[in-house]
Amino acid sequence: MDSSSPFDRIAERVERLLVRHEQFESTIALLTDQVATLTQERDSLRSRLQAARARVDALIERLPPPPNEKDAQ
């Protein structure tokens, strides 16, 4: 049988909970940093995509108009 007092068992459990709490806080901090990094990366990629679309649209504008189907016959 366990010879420790109920107080000792509670104190031990509280200590374990405090360690787990610290681990969770550390994990949350790391995940928060990752979210910030990924958000910046996403925003950068969106910006690059918009710039690429603008370049493609500008190139399309420079294309000559398609020949009229009646003229091709």
Image (cartoon, rainbow, N blue to C red):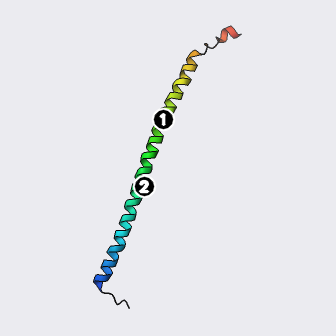
Q: In the displayed image of the protein, which residue is found farthest to the top? A: 71
What is the quadrant of the C terminus in the image?
top right
What is the quadrant of the N terminus in the image?
bottom left
Relative to 31, residue 73 above or below: above
Q: In the displayed image of the protein, which residue is found farthest to the right? A: 73
Closer to the camera in the image, 68 or 6 = 6
Q: Position of residue 60 (x, y in %)?
A: 57, 19
Q: Which residue is mark 2?
A: 30
Q: Secondary structure at mark 1?
A: helix
Q: Is residue 12 left or right of residue 46?
A: left
Residue at (37% x, 89% y) in the render: 2
Q: Position of residue 31 (x, y in %)?
A: 43, 54
Q: Residues within 10 Å of mark 2 (few under 14, many from 20)?
A: few
Q: Is residue 36 left or right of residue 59?
A: left
Q: Position of residue 59 (x, y in %)?
A: 57, 20
Closer to the camera in the image, 1 or 21 = 21
